Image (spheres, rainbow, N blue to C red):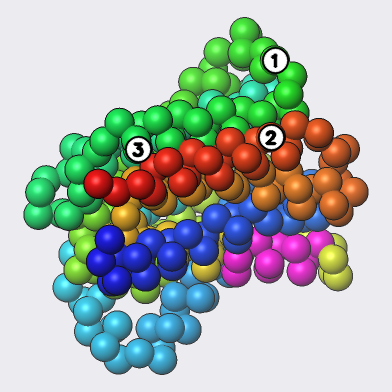
Amino acid sequence: MRAETARATSIGFAAVPIWSLLPALTVAAGSIPPLELVALTFSAGSLVGLLFLAWSPAARKDLRRAGMGPVLLGTTGLFGYHFVYFLALQNAPAAEASLVNYLWPVLIVVLSAALPAHAGAGRLTALHLGGGGIAFAGAVLAISGGGVPKLEGSAFGYGMALTAALIWSIYSVATRLFSSVPSAAVALYCLNTAFLAAIAHAALESFVWPAPGAQTLAILALGIGPLGLAFYVWDHGCKHGDLRMLGVSAYFAPVLSTAILTLSGLSPAKPALWLAALLITGGALLASINF
């Protein structure tokens, strides 16, 4: 792996520990309606990119060449994924819906093979597929706690979870086609997502004022971190790094998030977590082997 690709992959991987904070911060955000929460957090998340654009004249110049394609892709990816994901959680058990949704990393590994040669995604091998499969088994353990997931019933919710996985994997792979667009463009995607979520919230939900203190801080942290900075580094990694490695390494997120929930006392300990971590680590190592 070239040094530039390895560096971009490392930057993209930084999204994983940031995303692992999402469940704990979501719990801390309390009973804010989901679409309102998307609007508030993505408004905060857009500030990360807007501040960078204000600081960097070069990024502003590059952004002018973005065109409508990347903006439509980014807005569809961010808003479409989160809207469908929330529908999944509202219409199916959360653990099982999350499990179906976590097909997206292995879908990234598989879909990367469909990219044209000039996109530079690299050759898909049996080791990538095997590593992705082992890592997915680890995600099953991390989410289910070693129990047997029950996927019967709640067909609409599970369908939405699968749709969410497809949206995010297609978005992540398709960003490779716009590698010349700076990752600061994610600020536009976040702004559009916040705007669309605000419209949907006004039509479907009642506004709830966040309580000052911990709840407001949790919403800001969500926007700046898991629903902000994480998307910028993920965008950079998907455009310039190793898509297959990013897809497999994303399975560390459910392990880390479960560990954080356990250590913070928000969730009971799951003995299967350690085995899940070993499986995901082994899967990532297997997928990283190059011949």
Residue 215 appears in view? yes
Q: Which residue is mark 3?
A: 128
Q: Which tag, 1 or 2, sits closer to the chain's start? A: 1
Amino acid type, callout 1: Val
Amino acid type, callout 2: Leu
Contact between labelled residues 2 and 3, with CB atoms less than 8 Å apart: no
How far apart are labels 1 and 2 at the CA level? 15 Å
Any magenta on residue 175? no
- The N terminus - image quarter: bottom left
Residue with the most extreme top position? 152
- Of residues 43 and 218, the one nearer the viewer is 218
Residue at 31 percent of width and 60 percent of height: 241
Q: Which residue is mark 1?
A: 148
Residue at 51 percent of width and 64 percent of height: 14
Q: Quadrant of residue 129?
A: top left
Residue at 37 percent of width and 70 percent of height: 7
Residue with the most extreme front position? 291
Q: Quadrant of residue 139?
A: top right
For the residues carrying marks 1 and 3, which lies nearer the camera in this image? 3
**Region of the chain picked out in magenta, as a range:** 215-225
At numbered mark 3, what does the secondary structure look like: helix, strand or loop?
helix
Answer left or right for 194 relative to 115: right
Coordinates of residue 257 in the picture (x, y in percent): 69, 48
Q: Which mark is residue 275?
A: 2
Amino acid type, callout 3: His
Residue at 30 percent of width and 91 percent of height: 57
At numbered mark 1, what does the secondary structure look like: helix, strand or loop?
loop
At numbered mark 2, what does the secondary structure look like: helix, strand or loop?
helix
How far apart are labels 1 and 3 at the CA level? 26 Å
Q: Residues within 10 Å of mark 3 (few under 14, many from 20)?
A: many
Q: Quadrant of residue 67?
A: bottom left
Q: Which tag, 3 or 2, sits closer to the chain's start? A: 3
